[in-house]
Amino acid sequence: MTKYIFVTGGVVSGLGKGITAASLGRLLKARGYKVAAQKLDPYINVDPGTMSPYQHGEVYVTKDGAETDLDLGHYERFIDEDLNQYSNLTTGKVYWNVLNKERRGEYLGSTVQVIPHITNEIKEFVYRVGKQTDADVVITEIGGTIGDIESQPFLEAVRQISLEVGRENSLFIHVTLVPYLSGSDEHKSKPTQHSVRELQGMGIHPNIIVLRCDKPLEESIFQKISLFCNVKPDCVIENRTLSNLYEAPLMLEESGFSSVVCRELHLEAKEADLVDWKNMVAQIQKRSKEVHIGLVGKYVKLHDAYLSVVEALNHAGYAQNAYIRIHWIDSESITKENVAQIFQGIQGIIVPGGFGNRGIEGMITAAEYARERQIPYFGICLGMQIAVIEYARHRAGLPEAHSGEFDEQCKDKVIDFMPGQSDDIDKGGTLRLGNYPCAIQPGTKMEHCYQSSLIQERHRHRYEFNNQYREQLTNAGLVISGTSPNTRLVETIEIKDHPFYIGVQFHPEFTSRPNRPHPLFQGFISAALCEKIEKEE
């Protein structure tokens, strides 16, 4: 029977529930169990697809095309399992489903209420993950903080699940903050006690309490929390702030986290195989080189807006013994006059995805600078479209080239809707989502990176390379290095006689893993390191 683990958070938000849940997933997988993970988010948006990156951070896209919370990226990177549309549920999606059922008459005239209809919808979703994946263990993180009004239906639903499957098949983990007061030089357990009491008032009794802290905790704190929160002494686990988040599973394992979980869930405590993970962490700690990368975007004030890109860069750095020093560059600040000054000392330029016309001209200037100065350039989604626009303007004799997204009236829309597409599509119905195949042209840098002629990558965009300009741009020297298998869609472009100048319409950052870096990020960082060596010589 599938076991269910529910992870809640208390005291404050941003404690790293997602990292705790992801770390546990990695530890259970290392013990030979099949793990599935999901996130329940209390906001009323149907999904994060239309939310501002400044508020929510990046939108993570699953293999099957679901736009989801960024925590799912942590789950995939740690557990190394592809998640799906059932891995993220919002209050908005719950009510959407329930109201549609009501309109179709599925409730047979019943008065539709939060209990049982909303909670039953949540329960069905949680159960479905286990059925769809055939997982031994389903780890469900409940977003928000205990005490939030909007989280209550989710908490009631998981309370009922625990009762239905039995206490031996369910487990509650509560992650709380233990603040440190420098004035009195001590940690305080009282906020945790209050948070647990609030949770108990909802009928949920946590089995394990994970204590988030910056400094090692005194033994007295563990004793207090065990006694006053009614949990076993070894079920109080310390989770310290670490220099690298991939150290978290090893630190938690030292505290006996997964063995306690196995015991409480009546799972056989198989030997954990963490050799590869330990080797990876050791490699991370031994890095001796560094490389400076300019990340050019419009949301750089919130680094979480590009979380998967940053992690993918770091993964490539781990494999190549290098610290990645990211320079966060607001594309609105870049002009022809200051571009050389801004990119002084930068060995590689990356332009990630985004929407809207703010800062576009700065990105185009950055792409031109990288092309002319032979600086490695990596354009992702919007970054590829920027490279196409720049090349069209300055190499293909199309000075007014632009994207239909940014200037509907422009003379040469080298980026536009494909024939048959329509502008009156809802913003929440983004056209291309999830995995699509790409055929790679032989003899290209793309082929060199992937070592394959056919790949699958995840997409999230509404505009495409305009085929009307394909011949003109290729005649001017632009290399179309990857297309859809039927050749209709241009997926990747590059430039010959350049250390690394690649644009891809997809999002390779979503499939990069800390112990298996993405080949394009590997190629980009390798080229940037060579650039650094050449300049030093």
Image: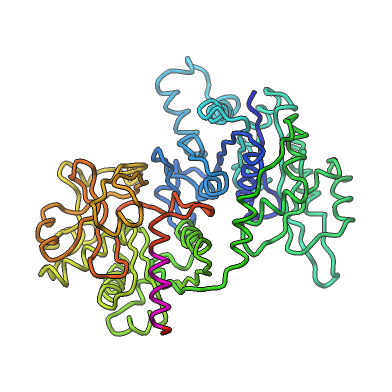
Residue under the point 30% across and 54% down: 447
Residue 232 location, quadrant: top right
The quarter of the displayed image where residue 533 is located: bottom left
Picture residue at 74% right of the left edge, 27% below the top? 167
| Residue 494 inside the magenta-drawn segment | no
Q: In the displayed structure, does residue 148 sit left or right of residue 361?
A: right
- Would residue 514 be found to the left or right of residue 359 on screen? right
- Closer to the camera in the image, 78 or 416: 78
Q: Is residue 310 left or right of residue 445?
A: right
- From the top left corner, tell me how far across and down residue 111 is, in percent: 53, 21
Name, please, the residue furthest toward the top. 108
Q: Is residue 136 above or below residue 399?
A: above
Q: Nearer the viewer, residue 517 or 510?
A: 517
Number of numbered discs visible in the structure rendering: 0
- What's drawn in magenta, residue-wise? 524-535
Relative vertical location of residue 102 with respect to residue 467 in this rendering, above or below: above
Quadrant where the C terminus sits is bottom left
Dominant secondary structure, magenta: helix
- Please provide percent x and percent y for residue 299: 42, 64
Image coords of residue 188 (percent x, y): 82, 59
Q: Nearer the viewer, residue 211 or 271?
A: 271
Residue 244, x across and y down, in percent? 62, 61
